[in-house]
Image (cartoon, rainbow, N blue to C red):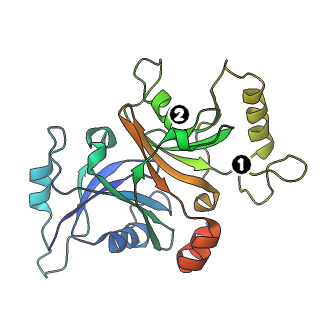
Amino acid sequence: MNTHLYLMCYRSEALVASQLPAEQFGNYMAVGTQKRTSGNVMFFEIDPSLVSDYLKLPKSLERCVPHADGTPRRSKYVSAYRVMEHVPLSAFGKLYLTTRDGRVLSLEGQEYVDADDSPGMNMYVELCPIYPRAVSSLAPGAFGKFMTNPQNPVSVPRLLFADSLIDRDVDGRLAGYLPYRDPAHIEDCLHQLAAAPGRKMSKTVDRNPPLVAFYRTIRRGFFLADQTGTRLYAYPSADELDEKHHVWWRSASIG
């Protein structure tokens, strides 16, 4: 049996070895174990040839063997602390999004180029290793560079974050279909940021936001960033999700 490496990254981080293919692993982690702390599960597939002085890979992989009855080993934890920063960007494969009832969608990664983006306000939810929601005038690549800059008073070595929808209705308010807690507060944060161009680039909205119907709130996609660059895991449009991934999208739209 092949042994896979998966990096859990939904508001926590852990490197897990498993003999399950990605779709089966996502289903198991969402509905086949009582260890989960949230219904949704997100994880990257990591190059199994990864070499690391920090992560104790050889010893952990040796323990990832089938059970006595021949069934595959579903999970063997390698590390649960400061994992993401010790895996090079080149080792990150597909990103898998799993709903609370075990439906799995995979996204391919690609290099993100800030020049391809248009100016304007953004809202980001940080997923790993920190978890705030923030509004920012910075495009995703610049935001990732800013948040991982060690010269800043507060920074992280690497950051996974999602680009959130901030659609407005005809009156300029956040669209009613967006399931955010306290939309008036988000509008106020966006207004404060717009009123101070050049003086303040980002503002925290919520230190630990509840991610209600999270997959329904994604705008452009997921970004994995550090000082060396940014990888984009582009999110399909709602029409494409409904047409090509209907079962997953129906599940994701519920919660």
Residue at image location 47% in from the left, 42% down from the top: 113
For the residue marked with disc 2, what is the amino acid?
Answer: Phe
Of all residues, the one furthest to the right in this rendering is 171
Badge 2 vs badge 1, beta-carbon distance below 8 Å: no
Of 49 and 125, the residue lying toward us: 49
Q: Tell me: residue 90, above or below residue 30.
A: above
Q: Where is residue 67 in the image (x, y as percent from the top left)?
A: 14, 74
Name the secondary structure under disc 2: helix
Of 187 and 196, the residue lying toward us: 196
Q: Quadrant of residue 44?
A: bottom left
Residue at image location 40% in from the left, 66% down from the top: 34
Of 227 and 248, the residue lying toward us: 227
In the rendered structure, the answer to whether residue 233 lies left or right of residue 73 reads right
Q: Tell me: residue 115, above or below residue 147.
A: below
Name the secondary structure under disc 1: loop
Distance from disc 2 to disc 1, alpha carbons, whole Å, reads 17 Å
In the rendered image, which residue does mark 1 sit on? Answer: 166
In the rendered structure, the answer to whether residue 213 lies left or right of residue 114 reads right
Taking the image as drawn, is residue 169 in sight?
Answer: yes
Residue at image location 35% in from the left, 34% down from the top: 228
| Quarter of the image where the C terminus is located | bottom right
Q: In the image, which disc is placed on residue 65?
A: none
| Quarter of the image where the N terminus is located | bottom left
For the residue marked with disc 1, what is the amino acid?
Answer: Ile
Q: Where is residue 145 in the image (x, y as percent from the top left)?
A: 46, 31
Along the polypeptide, which appears first: circle 2 or circle 1? 2
Taking the image as drawn, is residue 254 in sight?
Answer: no
In the rendered image, which residue does mark 2 sit on? Answer: 143
Q: Position of residue 53 (x, y in %)?
A: 14, 38
